[in-house]
Image: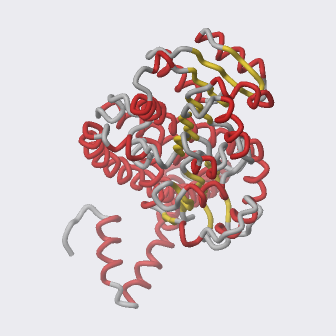
Amino acid sequence: MPLFSLGINHHSAPIHIREQFVVNMDHNQALLKDLCRLEAVNEAVLLSTCNRTEIYMAGEHSQGLMQWLGQSCAANISMEPFAYLHQDEAAVRHLMRVITGLDSMVLGEPQIFGQIKQAYRLACEAGTAKQQLQHLFPSAFAAGKMIRSQTQLGANPVSLAYAAVQIAKRIFTHLSHCRVMLIGAGELIELMLTHLTAQPVRQIIVANRTIDKAHQLADACGGTSIRIADIPNHLAQADIVITATASQLPIIGKGLVERTLKNRKRKPILMIDLAVPRDIEPEAGELADIYLYNIDDLQSVIDSNLKNRREAGLQAEALVELQTAHYMRQRQVLQISDIITQFREIATGHRDEATQKARLELAQGRDPHWVISQLAYQLTNKILHQPTMKLRQLAYHQEQDALLFAKKLLTSETNL
């Protein structure tokens, strides 16, 4: 059964398109089960991150997948102009490139590995990752680990968090004088905390819907925790605002930013929105004294820090090609295993039938030497009957290529 990967990412679509196709991971398993109700879909894994939304599937064909994803995300635009579709070897290669970070906005970033493992785990729990995908994904994970260990792909400190700090350093001479508000409590915010505490900054405020999680992160850096609902009361304190939540609607609007600037007497604010969909209304960036960056804007900063990773990336690309070819050969072996199993079952049936007949003849007192001879003769004829008939058919229809292959397969001779 063919393998497919279909999706959009930061290469194929800008942020205002990508954010319409974000899948809420809380609904991942329900969506997977719904997806596998499509007639053509046998197995599926659904991945959605800030930079990509992708379906990996085994099925008869890929028709209807784009329409299904658009309806599931309630998108008001067609996905087709921005989507990519890979099949079989190309789909395997794409997955391995994604897992290793070769397809990421930040070349070699490691977070995607864990995100794909989570997506695969959810698919296994939902029962939508079966034989083919349960072979593909573990193989791709193993290849990804090997590639990262054998190259310097992840050796240099380049990440979205790193890029955000570099932007802050361009705007503010001394980060030690800055108060920072972090909105959210996920992996990106935790990574931001690691980079910020290494600077250090004057104060860190962590805002989150779950106050306990905000407390946990703030305590780790000696900061302050607040609820997201209390942001309007504290925003004026922040020189830098970095947000990365899973909210489906903006958390900070243009009006709130305008009021905040008045309270700050027009002191500038750097706002970095790492969320997809975006947490900060894009219109806020039109205001004087507001420096608003979204996740796509960070690419220019990241590009200047990628020379070493690009060199490692060339090595990793070559290893991806080798591992993709290795997987495709493994897949061919798995596909032929069903034929081998069927052939062995037929031969075993002939063996059991001939053995049972020989036992009856021995019980009737027939000569053992004669019984053994008959057993060997009958068993040989039964096992060879079907292949012999097929060879005669090939000869009758003059299928020389098939005959040459059969001779190579069935005999030890190499020439006719």
Query: Which image quadrant for residue 268?
Result: top right
* 305 and 3: which is toward the camera: 305
Quarter-of-image position of residue 11: bottom left
- Residue 380 vertical position relative to residue 226 in the rendered view, above or below: below
Q: Residue furthest bottom?
A: 397
Of 407 and 64, nearer the camera is 64
* Residue drawn where x is 35% and y is 65% of the image: 410
The answer, for residue 171, to whether it is visible in the render is yes
- The foreground one among 25 and 327 is 25
Which residue is outermost to the left?
415
| Residue shown at 21% from the left, 75% from the top | 416
| Number of numbered discs on residues | 0
Rendered residue at 54%/65% (across/down):
2
- The image shows residue 38 at horizontal and vertical percentages of 74, 66
Q: Position of residue 370 (x, y in %)?
A: 50, 56
Whether residue 354 can be seen here: no
Coordinates of residue 86 in the picture (x, y in percent): 49, 64
Model colouring: secondary structure
| Relative to 166, residue 383 above or below | below
- 314 relative to 187, above or below: below
Image point (73%, 69%), residue name? 39
Locate residue 322, reporting x and y percent.
31, 49
Left or right? Give the position of 90 relative to 193. left
Quadrant of the frame with the N terminus: bottom right
